[in-house]
Image (cartoon, rainbow, N blue to C red):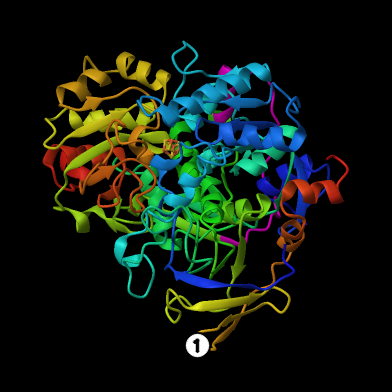
Amino acid sequence: MLAGKIIGKIYVLGDNIDTDQIIPARHLVYDLEDPEKQKMYGKYCLSGVLDDQAGLPDGRIPFVLPGKTTSEFQIIVAGKNFGCGSSREHAPASLKIAGVQAIAAESYARIFYRNAIDGGFVIPFEVAKSIYRTFKTGETVEIDPQSNLLRNVSTGMTVSLLPLGDAAAILNAGGIFNYARTSHEFL
Amino acid sequence: MGMTITEKILAKHADRDSVKPGDHIWIDADILMTHDVCGPATYAIFKREFGADAKIWNREKVVVIPDHYIFTKDLHAGRQIEQLRVFAKEQNLVHFYDVGTPRYKGVCHVAMAEEGFDRPGQVLFGTDSHTCTAGAFGCFATGIGNSDAAFVLGTGKLWVKVPHTCRFEFFGKKPPYITAKDMILTIINEIGIDGATYKAMEFAGEAVHDLGIEARMTLCNMAVEAGAKNGIIEPDETVFEFVNQRSRAGYDVVTNDPDARFEKVFRYDVSKLIPLVAGPHSPQNGAPVTEAEGTRLDQAYIGSCTGGKLSDFIAAAAILKSGEVKIPTYAVPATVSVEQGLKETLMDGMSVLEILEFAGVNVGPPSCAACLGGPPDTFGRLNHSEVCISTTNRNFPGRMGSKESRVYLASPYTVAASALTGKITDPRRFMN
Ligand code: SF4
């Protein structure tokens, strides 16, 4: 899962994007395991973000266009404490369903981070320095998990990513179940 | 080297003599709790990974408490409860508190305590971030996602990273107008909503041990609002007495080693605290009520696992008995026993329920209700651009409904005083 480079358009958000902004609570009613119903999580992904914060620096950029269930943005760039709030796994799941592959944030809330990794949804990279004020929604970014570098293809700017550490093994396995199967006898 | 309570509980459940912060360990769960929002998906993942006919690791250790979307006509929400019934039946669960039956409880974290599942020294996982509430009983309790919960369902185990412990000591004598809600908002205001990310928050000091069990639950409940993995309080007589009345399951009293290491120690003189109000859109946006006074409000809300316990309503009633609310005010008892308590607890010859109703408060049936917004027909939900003051725990954009709404978090005293005036009001104006 971690082998290749990830290239995609970025959607930029600020600090403290909580799980209610990622997927508002009223939408937690659709069946996550049903391939058709789960599309609703893509449709409403990030719909709770305040309008002027939605797609920085300008804001008011819909993450998912009306009528669509996936986003044109594959990478999220964000500030501190991404995913704070509830334990709902619907949050990383909805990002994945919307087509997001990776997040590059300054830091994460604990449960979101764990869910993203253990469920094998999206890769939560931590950037070594704040970039959400210098990157613009719509720019193209390339992430190289081997060299831990993030390059803004549109501007040429390069930023290092913190090593994934212990999480890498679980991400590589594709989630907690495969990880436990390959490394522990109780599965 | 000495260990903290959290480290000792984790070491024991990993079958080790000792652990240190940063260690990755696999631990045994004593209890796994889930509810209507996360239970169905958790069970589906369990089946996907362990097989359609697989049996869960221990049918007596799984507790299923529907509480989030109960009194709504939303069909999808109704289906989720139906899926819990299938789960309970297939697995022959012992602890399922179904809606529409005499077993129905209400908000899971309060129900867990009432039913004696929160016990010293245990490891408790729950598919809800406020599972940390149970730390008030001296156990390690933390919120997890559906995949992790499905893993626990199948194996009874989960990996954890041993957290560093930060200690928050309260000393001095607590003035009557200060509540646990003000104490925890004070901490979050200081350290921020990511100030304890990945850490254990231990609450200690004489002023914490002077608190009743419900107030201690409020402290631990909002540990997650500072990003913590768990909140915890050394168990004492107050805990033992409460637990002994509700459970015969036994427990393990774990306390800090004398040379336990804390990453940081914070100290607060509780006698100097001022009631706090956390403004939109973050629990860390705290300001002394004296500074926020006068802010116009459209609605007040008393409820949730944070501010919907019996003691919270008794506090609100102490203020509400002096008048009538000026703005629509909603009260949602966390559980059926809290609801019962409202009827049975008398203050100056009136029940708490009568006081609330006399003051013009709308009292709804026990559940999470508008604490997390929920479907549009949810009792007390903010459907437009209302400004609300609430005893709940979160005020991120849209948490209680529409993202145009704005929420102030405060203690039951402050919420009640503000309901009486229609503006944010210092509760001391109504207390002698
Ligand atoms: S009352 Fe609110 S915070 Fe508590 S469990 Fe329910 S939704 Fe979560």
Say left or right for B158 vs B169. right
Q: Is residue B71 visible?
A: yes
Q: Is residue A152 magenta?
A: no
Residue occupying image coordinates x 39% and y 45%: B393
**x then y, percent, for residue B203:** 53, 47
In the rendered image, the quadrant that contains the C terminus of chain A is top right
Residue B81 rendering spot, x and y as whole percentages: 50, 24
Where is residue B243 drawn, in percent x and y? 58, 24
Task: Report the residue at 83% width, 42% height from top.
Answer: B15
Residue B94, visible in the rendered structure:
no
The residue segment tinted magenta is: B239-264
Residue at which label 1 appears: A155
- In the drawing, does residue A31 fall left or right of residue A47? right
Left or right of B344 in this view: A87: right
Q: Which quarter of the frame holds ligand 1?
A: top left
Work out which residue is located at the far bottom of the displayed protein and give it. Answer: A156
